[in-house]
Image (cartoon, grey):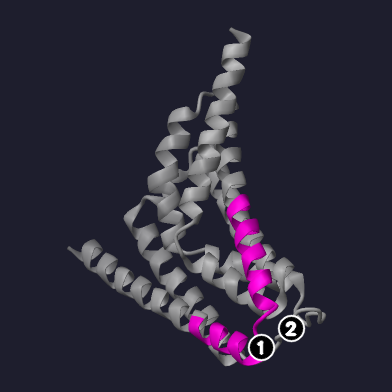
Amino acid sequence: MHNEGGYKLVTLFLTNILLGLSIALPVGTITIEMTKQGLKNGFMHGWVVGLGGMTVDLVLILLLYFGLASVLAVPIIQTFLWLLGALFLLYVGYDSIKNAGHGISLSGEKSTKSLKSSYFNGLLVAVSPGNLVFWVSIFGPILINSFDASNTINFLVIGAGILIGILIHDIGLMTIIAGTRKVLNTRYIQWASVLAGVILIGFSVYFFMEFYRSVGTLRS
């Protein structure tokens, strides 16, 4: 029985690693910011952006653990999150375009950007309504259903598996970006930063539209 229980936990852990990996694969705001920082400043800066995003993921797992997920599901809270996320992404996108030609360090050169700054970039981009609502709607039921006050091991195994899956994705992505960076010159990296900024602003426009729609829903 003990071995059977251990086997189930291992299977649960591996399954949720695959879940975390598959969820991280589609291109989103964090992936775009990681790619931009990875091209401009190297592997560590791109990866640290991902760690900033994972910090938000971890906080959300803890919120779900303590039963606070319902707060994020309140319509007026979601409306506020759409606006907050839109403003954050608009700022990050604008900054990406404005400073596209600044702070670029080619392969072998030391970056002038601090890792702390890259980490906070990841935090900033991750605090978006899309990410928050996604966690509540997709991972919320999975984690809540696995929670048992007398036995929290399943909850912790699922949460750890998801985070490790995301981590594997981030390391793999940055390995590819680091290799690509070696053959790109400053001009290509600059245009990649501009493109990333445009895409992030596009996300912010979508969030503003969702904010407007949410306000309309609240009034009706």
Direction from residue 211 to residue 201 in the image, left or right = right
Rate crowding at label 2 as few (under 14), some (14 to 19) or many (20 or more) other CA atoms within 10 Å. some
Q: Main secondary structure of the magenta part?
A: helix
Asked whether the beta carbons under mark 2 and mark 1 sit within 8 Å of each other, the answer is: yes
> Is 142 covered by the magenta stretch?
no
Q: Could you tell me which secondary element the residue under label 2 belongs to?
A: loop
**Relative height, residue 81 to residue 13 (above, below):** below
Quarter of the image with the N terminus in it? top right
Residue lying at 40% horizontally and 71% vertically, measured from the top left: 83
The number of numbered badges drawn on the structure is 2
Rate crowding at label 1 as few (under 14), some (14 to 19) or many (20 or more) other CA atoms within 10 Å. few
Direction from residue 131 to residue 158 in the image, left or right = right
Between disc 2 and disc 1, whose residue precedes?
Answer: 2
Query: Residue reaching furthest front?
Result: 183
Q: Residue 140 sits in which quadrant?
A: top left
Report the residue marked by disc 2.
106
**Residue 166, can we see it?**
yes
Direction from residue 158 to residue 185 in the image, left or right = right
**Amino acid bearing label 1:** Asn
**Amino acid bearing label 2:** Leu
> Is 177 covered by the magenta stretch?
yes
Image x and y of residue 74, in percent: 36, 52
Query: Residue reaching furthest left?
Result: 220
Image x and y of residue 189, in percent: 61, 85
**What segment carries the magenta color?**
167-195
Q: CA distance from mark 2 to mark 1?
A: 7 Å
Direction from residue 180 to residue 203 in the image, left or right = left
Residue lying at 60% horizontally and 64% vertically, measured from the top left: 123
Report the residue marked by disc 1.
185
Decide which of 79, 156 is in the foreground and name it: 156
**Relative height, residue 120 to residue 110 (above, below):** above
Decide which of 135, 104 is in the foreground and name it: 104
